[in-house]
Image: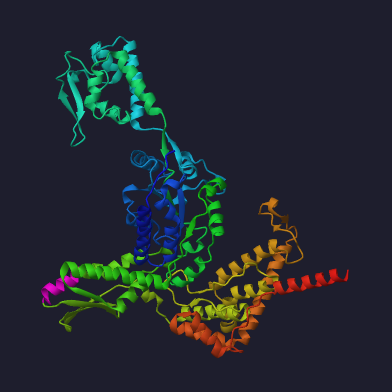
Amino acid sequence: MQKEKISRDVVVVRLASLEKAKVTLQKEFIGIDEVIEQMVQSTRTWFTLPGLQTRPVIINLWGLTGTGKTSLTQKFTELIGMDGAFYNINMGDSNDGGMSFYNTLDEVFEHNSGKPFVLLLDEFQHARTKVQGQDRIAGRMANIWKMLDSGRLEMHDFSRSIGILNQRIKQLRLCLKHGVEVENGYVSKNLQTYCDITNERIENADTILRRDRRTGIPRRHKNKTNKLKKSLPFYPSYEWDELVEISKGRFTSEFEVEKLLAQMDGEQVISFLEELLDEAKKPKILDCSKALIIVAGNLDEAYQMSHNQNPDIPADVWKKLTKDISLNHIKAALSLRFREEHIARLGNNHIIYPAMGEKDFKDYIQLRVNGISKSFLNQHGLKLMVARSVLNIIYQEGVYPTQGFRPVNTTIDRFVQNNLSEILGHKLIDFPESDQVRLSFSSGRLIFEFYHSGGIIGSKKKKVHLTLQDKRLPKRNNDQALTSVHEAGHVVCCAMLLGEIPEIAVSATSDTSSGGFVIRTGRNKVLQRSQLIRTLSFKLGGYAAEKLIFGKDNLTTGSSSDITGATLFVRNVLADSGFEDMPAAIVTKNERLDLGVLDHDGQLDKLVVQYLKEAEALASKTLESERILLMEVARALFDKGLLKQPQMKDLISKHAVYGSVPVKFEFPFKDRFLKQLEQVDSLQKVA
């Protein structure tokens, strides 16, 4: 194999191109600097020294929807000058992505086989090879896995042209068998028999059918080259272009086909067609060894918050949670969709996107608005200033944290882009001397203030319908009073029993299916027996608070989801934890008996009830002792509708019995372990 020689200058230029691309990408893409750094680092050798590559470089991009996986790949490819060798297959376009895949590979074979190119396999979660735990026949997708493995792929042509040719050969053989004769490529005897077998029309004799080069529509022409009268081509003229397509470059036009066929009799025509068919059926080897393959997708199994569309949960909460997603989480999520050998072929180069935080969304909004303002000034000569109040309402109305930037774009259009024609109309009609306009928001209205030489000369207002923000406002009604007490119960139990202040507590939400909620992000890798009751008390804190403040007779169904969640939680823990001197997995008669020991006497259910009662008692005792704190948190939720962690911390410092959150209890496993080791060492010395 001939070695590829790349000069020092070329390497330096390519490295500089990568660095420049990285800087540009980190300016244009918000919140993914580390992702961009990893991507550039992973492609450095592929881009600078492609001759060293014997297998494709595979980079996996996983994240929530709308975080820029596809657009980053496209922009990166453009910045390094590879956009002419960029191919994109959306794996969600069809059941298995097969036809899109083959069409793309035909292009790659023609232009880039054995050369560096970039292939994006987008929405890759749809390429699953396991469904509900069972292996799924990969079909055409098997070729994708072959390509990801070795980079070399046998491509068989299953085009329509081959099918047509195969069928036509059978018809022409039948024609000869029934006495049809051929001279110089044209039927010279038994034309009617030929027409009956091939479905040709005898009235079309002495004409040929060609596709119009401009429109592609077949048109009949008088045949000026055929010397026979009342005759038709043995191989129909309207299929000559199909022969050009499958000839693999042997013919460049149908005129060349016509010229060759004009020298043949019937057997020679069929022999020629069979030769073409055999050649077309031979596989062609596609060499993708120099490729950069980007696998991109959304893995809901790893990003479990992806199904939570509540816009009231702070973006920073989800960002914090996604930072804990590791390569092990990704591979575990992949194992639910793909067979083990397929996961292995994806390699270990998995780049994990974080969820976007509050600052990321606000930076993105500012970036988009700046771009709109710049474009408006360049096209119409009017400077557009967008006030902070508009940026804030765009965030409040447009951000659904688990959906990424896409919904935000439509809200930016609603508050800024879609008002530009109206602003320009006011300038031209009402304020022709204006040279700048300020767009602000107040009390449900957009305000257009027009300026000339720094001074305001007039304004216009426009009412705007708010879809989310109005619903978030505290209602201070019966429902919110109940919700405020309920969520305050969760907050106090979380702080006093688990030693953790929640991220957020909400009693007025835009989500009509939810009265309120409390979000905590702290979790233990393992749950200790001593923590189980406390965790259950937190889950039942809302129920206990309602019972304490409003009385048992005024309990509502609002705690049903909490009670169900607590019941399932403790049951699952007790069923296989061994906490109650039962080192065995316990199952009921409705569960698979091969997964555990059957709970014949209902002992598990009795334990569940026992734990729930004990947890409720602890929650009630805690809330009674911290009644002032409970009511002050409830007051704040009733007045404001939402409390963040710093606000709750301040309330605890002012109103908790001991003025602070207890230290989070964790059993000192390490200290106990080291102490036991010391005892063992002492015994060995004595011996």
Q: Is residue 587 left or right of residue 65?
A: right
Colouring scheme, one of rainbow, by chain, secondary structure, one colour? rainbow
Frontmost residue, 641 versus 425: 425
Q: State whether residue 257 is above or below residue 110.
A: above
Does residue 255 appear anywhere in the picture? Answer: yes
Q: In this view, does 308 lie to the left or right of 13?
A: right
Please state the total of marks drawn on the protein image: 0
Q: Is most of the magenta stretch helix, strand or loop?
A: helix
User: Measured from the top left, where is residue 270 in percent x and y?
Assistant: 33, 17
Q: Does the magenta stretch include residue 644?
A: no
Q: Which residue is drawn at 24% across and 71% down?
A: 373
Q: In this view, does 476 lie to the left or right of 445?
A: right
Q: Residue at x 70, y 52 (%)?
A: 593
User: Measured from the top left, where is residue 492 in percent x and y?
Assistant: 57, 81
Does residue 43 appear anywhere in the picture? Answer: no
Q: In this view, does 255 lie to the left or right of 553?
A: left
Frontmost residue, 596 versus 104: 104
Q: Residue at x 38, y 57 (%)?
A: 15
Q: Is residue 422 magenta?
A: yes
Q: In which quarter of the image is the C terminus?
A: bottom right
In which quarter of the view is residue 171 placed? top left
User: Measured from the top left, where is residue 42 in percent x and y?
Assistant: 45, 56
Q: Quadrant of the N terminus?
A: top left
Residue furthest right in the image: 687
Q: State whether residue 223 is above or below residue 127.
A: above
Q: State whether residue 246 is above or below residue 30.
A: above
User: Measured from the top left, where is residue 292 in percent x and y?
Assistant: 42, 49
Segment colored magenta: 421-432
In which quarter of the view is residue 475 placed? bottom left
Residue furthest front in the image: 8
